[in-house]
Image (cartoon, rainbow, N blue to C red):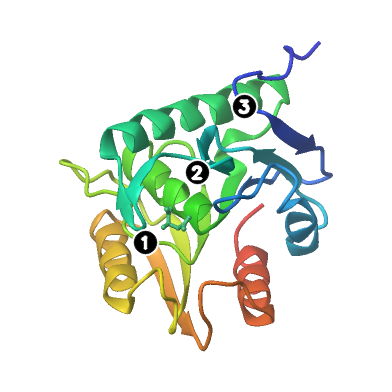
Amino acid sequence: MNAKPPSTFHHVFVRGKSPRTLLLLHGTGGNEHDLVSLGRNLDPEASLLSPRGKILENGLPRFFRRLAEGVFDEEDLIRRTHELADFVKEAATSYSLESERIYAVGYSNGANIAASLLLLRPDILAGAALLRAMVPLVPEVLPKLNKISVLLLCGRYDPLVPEENARQLAALLTDAGAAVALHFENAGHQLTEHTFDATHRWLADQPF
Ligand code: MLT
């Protein structure tokens, strides 16, 4: 019998038919339901694990605290990253997931904590699609990401993520050994049809 579902995060879990799991991480003001249909459309067969961020900023859920727009509370970010990593491990046990097949799909604040997971807990994810992400932190010691596949989809006109910052994130992950694909779309911070199509194609190329 499986252990009981993890209770550290409100979350949605939808069991799929393939060994892959998508860890869906919403943006500021989202919740655990936000990305479920996107995840299902991205991969009709995968299991979906979608937690809700625990921080409330003026009532809006997020995955970690920030001091101002684009300025992160690093101590809180580190703590929340480990908390999320532990939740994913616990969920993998409770729901009998293949832990080497967990791919993050994160948007905005969710993409930022997914990038932080890669940098601080490199054992958790098999790959990550980071949609409108920025550098969450620069760790003292770079992890060994061993060619783990990372898709970075950025908006050329994104008012929250300057192009330079997205390039720095790509460089940081590449220096850590990830296989990074960086693309700029003619878009702002919002997701577009192109973001969806590119993520869909990237996922189809990942082993499951
Ligand atoms: C963040 O705080 O993670 C980024 O600024 C993106 C967002 O607005 O959530």
The N terminus: image quadrant: top right
Q: Which residue is mark 1?
A: 134
Q: Callout 2 environment at 10 Å: few (<14), some (14 to 19), or many (20+)?
A: many
Q: Which residue is mark 3?
A: 9
Q: Which mark is residue 125?
A: 2
Cβ(mark 1) to ligand 1 < 8 Å? yes
- Secondary element at tag 1: loop
Q: From mark 2 to mark 1, how far is it between C-alphas?
A: 18 Å
Q: Position of residue 75 (x, y in %)?
A: 27, 32
Q: Nearer the viewer, residue 79 or 48?
A: 79
Q: Nearer the viewer, residue 31 or 46?
A: 31
Among the two numbered marks 3 and 2 on one chain, the one whose residue lies closer to the N terminus: 3
Q: Which tag is nearer the camera, tag 3 or tag 2?
A: 3
Q: Callout 3 environment at 10 Å: few (<14), some (14 to 19), or many (20+)?
A: some
For residue 83, side relative to residue 10 (left or right): left
Among the two numbered marks 3 and 1 on one chain, the one whose residue lies closer to the N terminus: 3
Q: Position of residue 17 (x, y in %)?
A: 84, 44
Q: From mark 3 to mark 2, how far is it between C-alphas?
A: 18 Å
Residue under the image location 35 percent in, 50 percent down: 146
Residue placed farthest to the left in the image?
140
Q: Position of residue 207 (x, y in %)?
A: 62, 56
The disc labelled 3 sits on which kind of residue?
A: Phe
